Each structure stands twice: as structure tokens, then as C-alpha cells.
Amino acid sequence: MTTVCYIDAAIRDNAGHHANACRHFVSEFRRRGMAVHTFGNRGLDPQVAQELQVERLFRHYPYSRLRGGAQFSHFVERSSFLADLKRVWSRGPSDIVFFHTVMAPQLGAVALWLRELEPAKMPFVVVGFDLPSGSKLNDQWSYHTPFYRKAGALFPHEYLRRVLLFAFDEAIADDYAQLLNLPVQTMPTIHTGLREPRLRARDADGRVNVAFLGHQREEKGYHLIPTIARRLMDRGLPVKLLVHNSAPDDGPTSRELRALARTNAHVVFSEEPGDQSHWQDLLDKSDLVVLPYEPNRYRESGSGIATEAVSDGIPMVVPPGTTMETLAAKYQGCAMAFSKWDADDVAAAIERAVMNFDALARQAEAGALTWRRNNGVGLFVDRLLAAASFDSRLSQSMRPSWSLREMLADRILDGLVSCLAR
């Protein structure tokens, strides 16, 4: 039996797309009769861990930088991931080791780990990229760029025939291929929805259900949403607004949205993460998905919400010059984009979309059918297995040990990660 080890140190709860990606991948591997062992973050919600059968193991949450200088914090983050990866491997090797959405420290750790294995006896390694590399940004993401280059240089070429580096979007794949100087493939996107796509239509009162969905952050324009909502209400636009935040907080934007929802019958503010069924319910309630994201940040990084909207046949309002605009143009016939990243311009783009909603909805429904022919986790795994190269006896023949030196280093790393956590 083929064994798969699925690793995502960022799985902590149902916020974001990490848990749902795990559901898609692990379910498909098991459907094909493979044995799957899944490992997530130590802080993973116990209920989610039980549902997904994920072992809570990785001590550092990749999205949280440790305190200290860039070189030192990167070294500790990489060392922590490497030590945890060795702990996983010491429990019994797998034929396929799958790393979902890595950042520079995790990529460097994977390269260092592989260098300790014999090329002829290594597993087939799958590494996914979805976050911005920072190579063309001047914000917090640019911190990672030199470390990605360093990680790319650690991969000896004799390992590459058993390594699949991938992204779901061509622009992202090209960016990482240039940065790492390694081949990065564009793979089918895994999301295809739980139900068949349907033609979106106005409600009986003529209103369009406009939705802002997901894990809300400033770079996603969360702070713009209250002003956008008021602009739409003031103009008397025939809309109902659904604002969802899968990572509830008590900041000023959330408090403002709560107050707005209390005083306006056409505004709903939903604050909760959810499993795949809950997420599908949110998509079912949405007739127009708005992504008021900062354009530069998303020129070469993807949006899970955009792919889910396309898959379900939901028209979108998107930031210009981004992977989302490309996606909408390819599958929905056109991209209703705002030109400036401010509330007034996003509201104006929503108004244009509502005025042209019936045509946009027909194009989105047709695009969803095309999308589902070209994507889905089944097609992804088909491509993966066609590329996979490994010794099927690997999981039975190798039993790596956990040395005393590694155990002592692990104790030291525990203390460092705890002390340096922000």
C-alpha cells in the first residue's frame, strides 16, 4: 500500500484555506486506497484535529515571525521545522511526503532534510507555493525573498526527479521558478465545490446578494468594507450585503460592522470559521463576491476565495493586474475590476457589476462548467501520481532513528521558539 505523509504546520483551525485543503487532499488520497498520516500545528483546535485526523506536532506557526534579526529568526524557524520533520520521519517513512503552502524557512528545512537522505531511497516530495515570494514587493513579504533564494540553492539537481514543486496559478509558478532557479509546475486547482454550479439570479425583490468572504485582514481591504457598505446603502443600490470574517476580532472595523448590521436590515455580519459544509453554505448565499484586495500584494499570489467563486459560477469584483483579474477574464468572460484601492472606487465597481449582473451571472455559470473540466483534486492527484517516482518498498524497509543529539537539540529549539514567539 502506498503511504502518504501530509504536512501543513499552518493548520490551526478552520480559518483560511489550510483545513479545507487538507480535507480535499487527504480525502482523495484515502479514496484511492492510500494510507495517509497527517501532521499540523501544535496549537490546532482539538475538535478540528479529531475531525481531520491530524496529529498536532509542528511547534512554530509559519505566519508568525519569531523575534530577533532576520538571519537569526529565519535560522530558528527553519531549524524548528527541520527538527519536527525529522520527528515525523523517525516514526516511519512514507512513499510520498506532501508539504502544503510552504514559506522560506519550511522550504529550506525540506532541502536540508533531503540532503541527509540517499537520493535513490528518498520519498517522492511534493511542495506547494501559494503565498507571495516578496520578490516584487516592498512590504513585509520582501523579508522572505533572499531566504527563498538560499533555499532554492540547497536543492541538488540529483534530487529533482523525485521532487514536485508546484503552484495553482501560472504567474505564481513562474515567479517561484525564477526566484528559486528550479522547475515549478502549474497544477490543477483542487476546489470544485460540493454542489453543481447554478445560475445566480436577483432575489424576488430585485436585490443582489453581495459577499465579502474569508479571513479578513487589512491587505484584503477589510478596513474599507464599512465605508463601502455605507456608500452602497446611501446610493440606494439594490443589494444585500454579507460580510464574513473567519478570524473574529474586536478591532475597530469589526465593531463598526457589528453596529452597521444592527441598524441595517440589508447588512449581515457573520463572524465564525467553519468546515467545508459551512463554507459552501456561505458561497450558496453569495451572488456577487467582492475581493477589495490591495493590488500589488496579489499580483503574484493567489486567492482561494476567487477560485471557489469561479468554481461555483459566482461573478466577482477583483483588484486590477492580479491573478484574480486573470482568473475572472479567463473563466467569466470579463473582469469587473476597480482601478484604485479605496472605498469609493471599489463601491463604484460593485455598482457597475450590479447594473450588469444578469450578463455577468450567465458568463460566470458557463465558466464554472469549464473550470470543473480543467480542475479538481482528482485531476491534481492524477498528475501527481503520473510524475511520482519512488521505491514502493520504502515505507516497509526504512526505520530512521532519533539520535540523542537530535533529542537535545529539540529541547533547545523548544525553548527558543517559546521565548522568541511574538
Image (cartoon, rainbow, N blue to C red):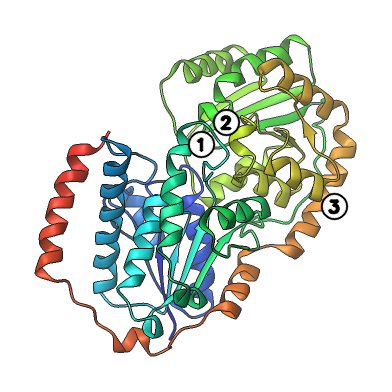
Residue at 26% over, 43% down: 72
Say which element carries label 2. Answer: helix
Q: Give the residue type at disc 3.
A: Ala
Q: Residues within 10 Å of mark 2 (few under 14, many from 20)?
A: many
Between 119 and 228, the one nearer to me in the picture: 119
The residue singled out by tag 1 in the image is 215
The image shows residue 69 at horizontal and vertical percentages of 28, 36
Where is residue 339 drawn, in percent x and y?
Answer: 75, 25
Task: Measure how far apart labels 2 and 1 are at the Cα level.
Answer: 9 Å
**Spatial distance from mark 1 to mark 3, Cα to Cα?**
28 Å
* Mark 2, residue position: 220
- Of the residues shown, which amino acid type is indicated by label 2? Lys
What secondary structure is marked by label 3?
Answer: helix
Task: Quadrant for the N terminus, please.
Answer: bottom left
Q: Quadrant of residue 268?
A: top right
In this picture, residue 273 sits left or right of residue 353: left
Which residue sits at x=53%, y=13%? 259
Judged left or right of residue 7, residue 78 is: left
* Mark sitting earlier along the chain (3/2): 2
| Residue placed under numbered mark 3 in the picture | 366
> Pointers 2 and 1 in contact (CB under 8 A)?
yes
